[in-house]
Amino acid sequence: DVVIVDMQQEALDGNTGIFSRELSRKITENIEKKEQTILLLNRRGFHTYISCLDCREPLACPNCSIPLTYHKPNGLLMCHYCGYTTPKITVCPSCGSRYVSGFRAGTEGVEAQVKKTFPQARVLRMDMDTTRGKDGHEKILSEFANGNADILIGTQMIVKGHDFPNVTLMGVLAADMSLYASDYRASERTFQLLTQAAGRAGRAEKSGNVVIQTYTPEHFSIVSAANQDYNAFYEQEIAYRKLCGYPPADNLMKIMLSSQDEMLLTKSAAWVKAFVDNNCKYKGLMCIGPADAPIYKIKDVYSKIIYVKHKDREVLTGIYEKLDVNIVGNQAFKNINVQYDING
């Protein structure tokens, strides 16, 4: 039994917490029945999408139809496909509403709220922090499997193929977080994740319940996942891919450049972009970027991305070969790491 809860309506009705009334009621019932619950915080990456709470539209890039990503501390909104940026938006460009916000809760915050709302519950949290030690994953999963906790909280790692016979409730918090990720595959990945999550509840004799909390209850990926209807999802998603020229309708090559020298990286990325524009004259070819990678700096290494689109995969392979010949052995790229990925 899968229920989609409209969190906008919950807020209008006076419930501004992270748990809908439906999910709170079912968690309480599960605790009383001594059955287990999994709470999935549907979060990918470290950044937040921004959307309008009135018209429900995400703030998207005008060039790429990809939701913009919010960056701390300056509040800039950025597209990680073409590099488009805009200052923090406080008024929705679609409807003029001032109710523009994003969901920023982490697993620790969810755990604290669970313990406050359900003080009688025994709680486990499974994320990067709690699984760092040796056999961290196995210990937490073993504890939960042995019935030593009523509620397990976590991100994607808790829905990947685990089989707990006493789990009869799966709660998905903020399904929109992966839906509006800065990636053209966001709807596909949301559908996959919600389908997997729904499969964690009711795997034995007891029936299962799934509560999906979202601000966009009508979105096709969420509705299709709730109905376990792949065909309905595919028909709408493939139409979007064809319209925007994303794989598998067109082919897409990602060129990622990385370096500890930020100025050199900027210069090298600009050279690659200019090389493709000037030396790869193919009809229908589109070269986008360079843009900062979704996580621009990791361990003092900066990364930029360039995307090249074309219907013919062989054209992209030819561009890769041309670039590789001009980059390998080129002293200007001595301290630059270049990686290519076609349709990855």
Image (tube, helix red, strand yellow):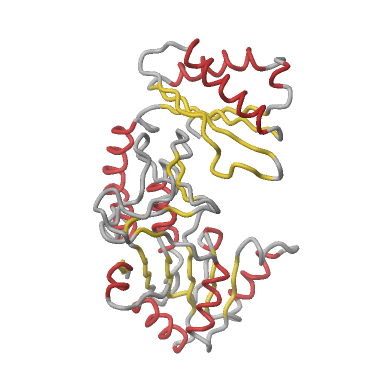
- For the point 45% across and 33% down, the residue is 82
Q: Is 77 situated above or below 147?
A: above
- For the point 44% across and 87% down, the residue is 33
User: Is residue 267 toward the left or the right of residue 28 in the image?
Assistant: right
Where is residue 205 shown, x and y percent of the image?
A: 42, 76
Among the 4 quarters of the image, the one containing residue 134: bottom right
User: Is residue 267 toward the left or the right of residue 135 in the image?
Assistant: left
Seen from the viewer's position, the closer of residues 119 and 76 is: 76
Where is residue 35 shown, x and y percent of the image?
A: 47, 82
Q: How many circles with numbers are drawn on the protein?
A: 0
User: Is residue 295 toward the left or the right of residue 84 in the image?
Assistant: right
For the N terminus, the quadrant is bottom left
Seen from the viewer's position, the closer of residues 5 and 27 is: 5
Q: Is 75 situated above or below 265?
A: below
- For the point 67% across and 64% down, the residue is 131
Q: Is 178 situated above or below 19?
A: above
Among the 4 quarters of the image, the one containing residue 6: bottom left
Q: Outermost residue, right direction? A: 134
- For the point 35% across and 58% down, the residue is 100
Where is residue 30 shown, x and y percent of the image?
A: 44, 83
Among the 4 quarters of the image, the one containing residue 285: top left
Seen from the viewer's position, the closer of residues 118 and 35 is: 118
Where is residue 86 shown, x and y percent of the image?
A: 42, 43
